[in-house]
Amino acid sequence: MTDQPIALVTGAAQGIGYACAEAIAESGARVVLADVKAEEVAAAAERLGGGAVAMPCDMGDPDQVAALFARIAAEVGAPSILVNNAGIALPGDFLDTSLDQFRRVIDVNLVGVFLATQHAAKAMIANGIPGAIVNMSSINAVLAIPTIAAYCASKGGVMQLTKATALALAPHGIRVNAVGPGSIDTSMMASVNANPEAIRTVMSRTPLKRLGSAREIADVVAFLVSEKAGYITGETIYVDGGRAALNYTC
Ligand code: NAD
């Protein structure tokens, strides 16, 4: 065992999660990358290097989440950093959305965050670690889109879960915050990127007139888990190119 901090990033095979793993590794931590895509996450850990470890896990499956934390404890040690980033949107017409689709989004985006936070916090407390947790929320925690009702509900839930867990874990010196991205250039935005009309709509409501990069989200996450953010807890920071501040589109 060394004194090197251990970080777990979920949904880390690509996109914002991988960028978070990279930024946190640069700050000196050893990173465990978890993702439902086993081959892709193995390749991502290999690419990251520096002792990074890949662990396949479906964050929407409570048994797999429990097994993930047992494996981390046995093979790597107790994490002092957790980034709950794994997320899905499953867009579609609200009237055609099945209960299974709705539940799947809530299970991955909200229940998964609850479970991982609880497992991580118990390990931090047992090991006397004053840890830091960051949840990946969204601008859709506060602004709704009709074709992703479950996603909006899950991210609104993440915002409140962030506050409640920040209060619950403050006595243990564990901070919990969230980052709420606007429109970020990852595979989640691929269908928008491929459609000129859709991209025009996104730009009309984005004052900085561009998509954000995964790294611009990861840098805020790396700040929030660092000692520089030692007095911040229960907060959601929106990194959205000014979108939430905008009162009209033209
Ligand atoms: P992405 O689709 O590129 O990456 C998501 C990653 O999560 C993938 O590697 C995927 O395999 C993994 N994942 C999906 N379901 C999982 C599960 N059940 N268990 C474990 N891993 C799973 O998307 P992204 O844009 O990088 O999104 C990352 C996070 O950022 C998500 O929570 C998303 O809601 C949030 N977000 C993204 C945007 C955006 O514009 N891209 C905006 C706001 C919020």
Image (cartoon, rainbow, N blue to C red):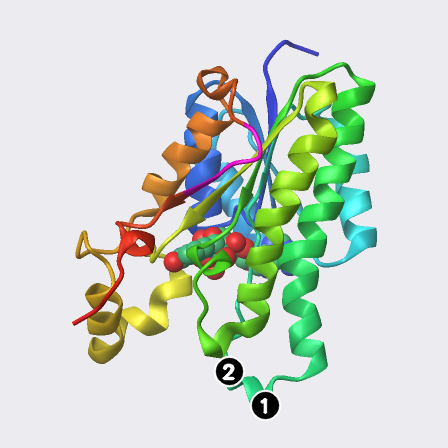
Quadrant for the N terminus, please: top right
Q: Residue at x 45, y 34 (%)?
A: 221
- The answer to whether 69 appears left or right of 4 in the picture is right
Quadrant for the C terminus, please: bottom left
Check mark 1 vs ligand 1: CB closer than 8 Å? yes or no: no
Q: Which residue is mark 2?
A: 92
Extreme top residue here? 3
Whole-percent x and y of residue 124? 74, 23
- Asked if residue 199 shows in the view, the reply is yes
Identify whether 82 is placed above or below 242: above
Q: Which residue is mark 1?
A: 96
Amino acid beneath label 1:
Asp
Span colored in magenta: 233-237
Q: Callout 1: 10 Å neighbours few (<14), some, many (20+)?
A: few
Q: Residue at x 68, y 24 (%)?
A: 170
What's the CA distance linking mark 2 and mark 1? 7 Å
Q: Callout 2: 10 Å neighbours few (<14), some, many (20+)?
A: some
Identify whether 92 is placed above or below 106: below
Q: Secondary structure at mark 1?
A: helix
Amino acid beneath label 2:
Gly
- The answer to whether 228 appears left or right of 64 in the picture is left
Contact, mark 2 vs mark 1 (Cβ under 8 Å) = yes
